[in-house]
Image: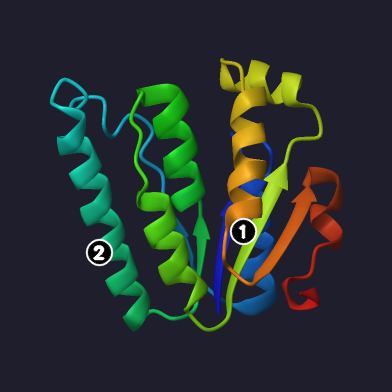
Amino acid sequence: MLVIVEGVDRVGKTTLCEKISKQTGIPIFKDEYKDGYKDFIKYKPIVVEKMIELKYQMLLQMLQFIPDLIIDRFHLTEFVYNHFSRGIYTNYFFYIDEALSKLPGSKLILVESLDIYASSEEHGGELANHEKMFRCLYSLSKIPRKAITNYKHIQDFCIFDF
């Protein structure tokens, strides 16, 4: 089973990943880079786009050997934060989403904010547009099994319900 957990900063994604891991025994991979691309932004956007493409090709290959995995942030996060925070626009989201939709047992969970203004304040920047884009990409995703939750409902969340 592949479980991808997405959403803006400070909404409970990691908490949900840990809960699912306890339910299933499946390990968590946290796709966390913070400012990982900041040193490369000075190059042409195509260089950064190629880095992103190679990263996802590697991760897709990894999933062939580790079919049971919980991923804390993945392709939706990359698209949203590249767009709003780095000014990088890539259509690689659609390629990766298509590939993920074909993996047996793949699930996409969007964790939404209970209070986007509080999340924005904790994050240190406005996140309302980020959350809107997450919702849009979630609706466009071809991954067949999807769910939306929030921090209030994480304790009741069961990965086997969908």
Provide residue 108's location: percent of width, then percent of height: 61, 62
Q: Amino acid at mark 1?
A: Cys
Q: Quadrant of residue 26?
A: bottom right
Provide residue 49's location: percent of width, then percent of height: 24, 41
Q: Nearer the viewer, mark 2 or mark 1?
A: 2
Quadrant in which the C terminus is drawn: bottom right
Q: Nearer the viewer, residue 115 or 100?
A: 100
- Badge 2: few (under 14), some or many (20 or more) residues near its Cα, within 10 Å? few
- Badge 1: few (under 14), some or many (20 or more) residues near its Cα, within 10 Å? many
Q: Is residue 144 visible?
A: yes
Q: Quadrant of residue 8?
A: top right
Q: Nearer the viewer, residue 69 or 88?
A: 88
Q: Please state if 76 lies on the left or on the right of 35 as rendered.
A: right
Q: Please state if 47 lies on the left or on the right of 22 as rendered.
A: left
Q: Earlier in the sequence, mark 2 or mark 1?
A: 1
> Mark number for residue 58?
2
Q: Determine contact: label 2, label 1, CB under 8 Å.
A: no
Whole-angstrom CA distance, mark 2 to mark 1, is 22 Å
Residue 154 versus residue 1 in the image, above or below: above
> Which residue is located at x 69 percent, y 64 percent?
146
Provide residue 59's location: percent of width, then percent of height: 32, 64
The residue indicated by pointer 1 is 17
Q: Amino acid at mark 2?
A: Met
Provide residue 137's location: percent of width, then percent of height: 58, 47
